[in-house]
Image (cartoon, rainbow, N blue to C red):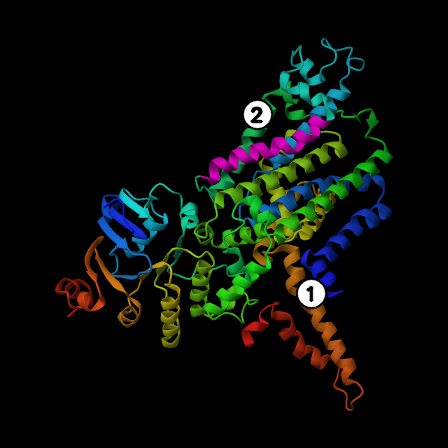
Amino acid sequence: MSNTDFALAVEDLTVSFDGFKAIDALTLYIDKNELRVIIGPNGAGKTTLLDLICGKTKASAGSIKFKNEEIIQVPEHKRVRLGIGRKFQTPSIYENLSVFQNLEVSYPSGRSVWGALAFTATDAIQARVQTVAEDIGLGDKLETEAGLLSHGQKQWLEIGMLLMQEPELLMLDEPIAGMSARERDLTAELLQRICQNRAVIVIEHDMDFVKKIAHKVTVMHQGKILAEGPMEQVQADPKVIDVYLGH
Amino acid sequence: MNALKAWISRYQLASLVLLTVLLAVVLPLTLDIFRLNLVGKYLTYAFVAIGLVMLWGYGGVLSLGQGVFFGLGGYAMAMFLKLEASDPETTKIQSTPGIPDFMDWNQITELPAFWVPFKSLPFTLAAVIVVPTLLAWIVSFAMFKRRVGGVYFAIITQAVALILTVLIIGQQGYTGGVNGMTDLKTVLGWDTRTDTAKYILYYVCVGMLVLSMVVCRWIQTSKLGTLLLAMRDKEDRVRFSGYDVADFRIFVFCLAAALSGIGGALFTLQVGFMSPSFVGIVPSIEMVIYAAVGGRMSLVGAVYGTLLVNAGKTFFSESFPDLWLFLMAGLFIGVVMAFPMGLAGVWESKVVPWWRGRQSALREASAARPQPPSPPPHAPMKSTAPTDAKLPDGTSGQSV
């Protein structure tokens, strides 16, 4: 399975911390244009898996192929440049900068030292910031300092910052944590819109939300994949009910 | 007109012009040349302080070894001046005429190879910037690429400062040892010790400082400045937005080093000597205090901080030499506890809002006057001042 048409192909991936295998020979394929949700009990290794894919944690063994290219040795910032975007669990935005600046800084040009010195926000970039800001519902808050946004708006802003980069693989770690019911609905709509033309991996605990957005669900347990498939199938799986969903 | 106003406020030109007028007009008119030369000496430390604003305030990287780069720039200039002061005619009583006196005392009979290029002024001027920058690049490349940062980096810079001091003191024959390089007199035959020369050097120093501040301000307003702030607060987010965080830190560390080197060279020119006492840990920490007192986010503030602390140092150490170090420590602790953003922070958060509040109150009072009964002028001031003052620009969008 070395030559594939998948957006992301993770094969036999293992990482151990002092002998403890947080991810244990895990194999996972994500299609282009797919929205995959990963669920599982705490400590199952969901966040670690995203850390490995984006390069925050170094794998002990195995392979990660993005668009058929081995990336296991590629440093983090270069993985981003290849088209992998990652949203962190707690909103990770620049609190002291305005919404506009947060988005502008995320635009993929002027990424070297000298490039950043010479960078100017052209009309095209400003228009792109405006488009993305409207997409995430912050179109009228461009001048607001990001630290003053509500928790939900911060989550959206971080998603917007990733959208600025137009990643081909977007990974979101608990994007609706701490959101109100209305914000959850808006986020679900947003995710359905942005998963066009790209692969999206979402980690989530909220089953209603998962049902709403998932194309396919992967259940992780103790660093391994317990089950994989459409939501109904996974929910009916006795193993899954046993370790995660409960009786 | 509005575009011009926006441009002026973007580059904080008003405060910069005010500082330039103070340095270039007010001080030369009010101080005698001895005191002015002293101010010129302080201003050479201000180069280090504005470098620290970029490095520490914006970049979030604290260096406790900026004296190293100040010293390297200063020594590069001192080597040129020392060679010029050691012509065979004036050193004819030495056993080897034509080499610096301290080499002769240390039984060195030939000018060491690394000294030879410093006979050239263009080479020296280049070395003033290149040598500190190169060392900064080596240190920061080794550290930042391995993700060493924060306190560990600060400690390593201290170690570098200590190593360089030991090296300079130990290699007396090549460096002048603990006495440093003294008796520096002329630049290409131009005597730097006359009053006229001191005025000229003072203005060169002010000019270079203002130029450096303009360059720094330009960097702050570029995307690089935004990125520095961003990575100071959320390093991982910047990294996972496709930037190599280490490259930006290396750049800003080299920038601070280059500025310090220029300051050091101007110090040597104005003061007429260079010694290891400006290289080590204590002066390096003092330089951090200048930036902290002035405000580590403000270039202009850092310059005022440098001037004030040094004026205080001169004043107190003339009157109470034993107490000075304690006062300095107290000042540092006090500033960090009470005004973490330094004088510039006090200005921004207290003085400016108070002034704005007063202004708008006066305007309202004069507008309200025709309608009897007119409210007492202080009443609206109390009610409008806090709301006007506390909301920073940009928060208005929140209420929409």
Looking at numbered disc 2 in the image, what kind of residue is underneath it?
Answer: Leu
Q: Is residue B141 magenta?
A: yes
Q: Which label is found at residue B352?
A: 1
Magenta segment boundaries in residue numbering: B122-145
In percent of width and height, residue B331 lies at 63, 50
In percent of width and height, residue B260 lies at 65, 38
For image coordinates 82% across by 36% down, the residue present is: B198
For image coordinates 34% across by 47% down, the residue present is: A57
- Mark 2 vs mark 1, CA separation in Å: 48 Å
Q: Is residue A36 magenta?
A: no
With respect to residue B214, does A194 lie above or below? below
Residue B331 in sight:
no
**Label 2 or label 1, whichever comes before in sequence order:** 2
Q: Which residue is mark 2?
A: B167
In percent of width and height, residue B202 lies at 79, 40
Left or right of B39? Residue B159 is: left
In percent of width and height, residue B258 lies at 63, 37
Q: Which label is found at residue A9?
A: none
Quadrant location of the N terminus of chain B? bottom right
Left or right of B181? Residue B161 is: left
Q: Secondary structure at mark 1?
A: helix
Looking at numbered disc 1 in the image, what kind of residue is underneath it?
Answer: Val
